[in-house]
Image (cartoon, rainbow, N blue to C red):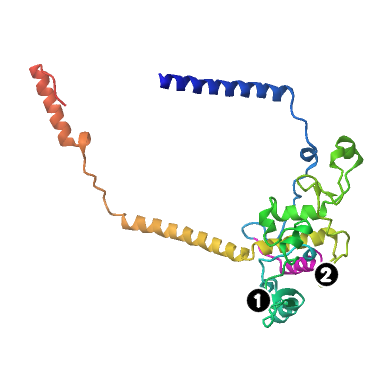
Amino acid sequence: MVRILGFLVGLGFVGVLLISLVINGIAAINEPAAETAEHKFYKYPKEVSFSSDGPFGKYDRQQLQRGYQVYKEVCAVCHGINYVAIRNLEDLGYNDAEIKAEAANWQIADLDPETGDDITRPGIPADRFPPAYRNEVARAAAGSPPDLSLITKAREGGAPYIYSLLTGYQEPSAEMLAEHPEIAPGPGLYFNPYFKNLNISMPPPITADGQVSYADGTEATVEQMSKDVSAFLVWTAEPKLEQRHRAGWATLIFILFATIFAYFAYRNVWAEAKRKVAPKGVLDPEHQAKVDHAEAEAAEDGRPVDG
């Protein structure tokens, strides 16, 4: 009886769920949800290529140095790259003297070894790049800007998203505001269609051509600076990308040749060998002959055959 009641109760729940599903489905068809402003005006990242893309990708050292310069002069005011050591600039093509000079330009929070007081000192190559704020309270007061060390891995779209975001600041058009007045940026917000909810609290960091003067003479347009710093942030997230690519291709080539050698070794070893498979069960000729003989005798005697 208990099982029957349990079955009926379960059947009732299933019935209610099915009825609810049908009703909601009909309502969704007859009265579809209105398209939101975020869904209508959001743009996916622009199609932009980097030298590090693809299985054969390699970093452009000149571009990485330009990107580092943009980060240092523009982005470092609010964002740190705390997972990167200053000595890693060697991967960008800087020599030891240049790395020491760069390290000395950064102020590192430390403790006085004699008094224990908080101090700042010039950096050394072994230091990591310092955070933009002394503590989490100060960072929160500034709107909690994220660390950029792994930003191209942490954000969907990677480097193209960063590039699109940096170049995507604009004012919403009158048509947009007339149709969806709620997208108008509020105090401390900026319209950017490449940001999920269209309004972002980060002011446009790269605002005009020539904001940075490149040492190599490259024209510092907004698009060029945005692409260079995006490439630099790919490197901060994947400093070993080139080594990983080389190791991957070496592994694939090794597996390919090992497979070919194994195949030819197999053919050579078994070229003259004859496989002998002992017949078993009903496929055994001797067994089948016995069965046929027993059936013939049974047929003559008019009796059934067992097995």
**47 or 114, which is in the foreground?**
114
Q: Residue 214 bears which disc, if any?
A: 2
Magenta run includes residue 66? yes
In which image quadrant can residue 271 be found? bottom left
Residue at which label 1 appears: 126
CA–CA distance between discs 1 and 2?
26 Å
Q: 247 or 292: which is nearer to us?
A: 247
Of helix, strand and loop, which mostly describes the magenta segment? helix
Camera-side mark, 1 or 2: 1
Badge number at residue 95: none
Crowd tier of the residue under label 1, counting other residues whose Cα lies within 10 Å: few below 14, some 14–19, many 20 or above = few
SS state under label 1: loop
Q: Is residue 289 above or below residue 172?
A: above
Tag 2 or tag 1, which sits nearer the N-term?
A: 1
Q: Is residue 228 depicted above or below 27 in this figure?
A: below
Q: Which residues are magenta?
A: 57-74
Find out whether the residues at labels 1 and 2 contact each other: C-beta distance under 8 Å.
Answer: no
Quarter of the image containing the C terminus?
Answer: top left
Q: Position of residue 49 (x, y in %)?
A: 72, 56
For the question of whether residue 183 can be seen, the reply is yes
Q: Which SS class for mark 2?
A: loop
Query: Residue 276 at x, y = what percent?
Result: 23, 47
Q: Amino acid at mark 1?
A: Ala
Quarter of the image with the N terminus in it: top left
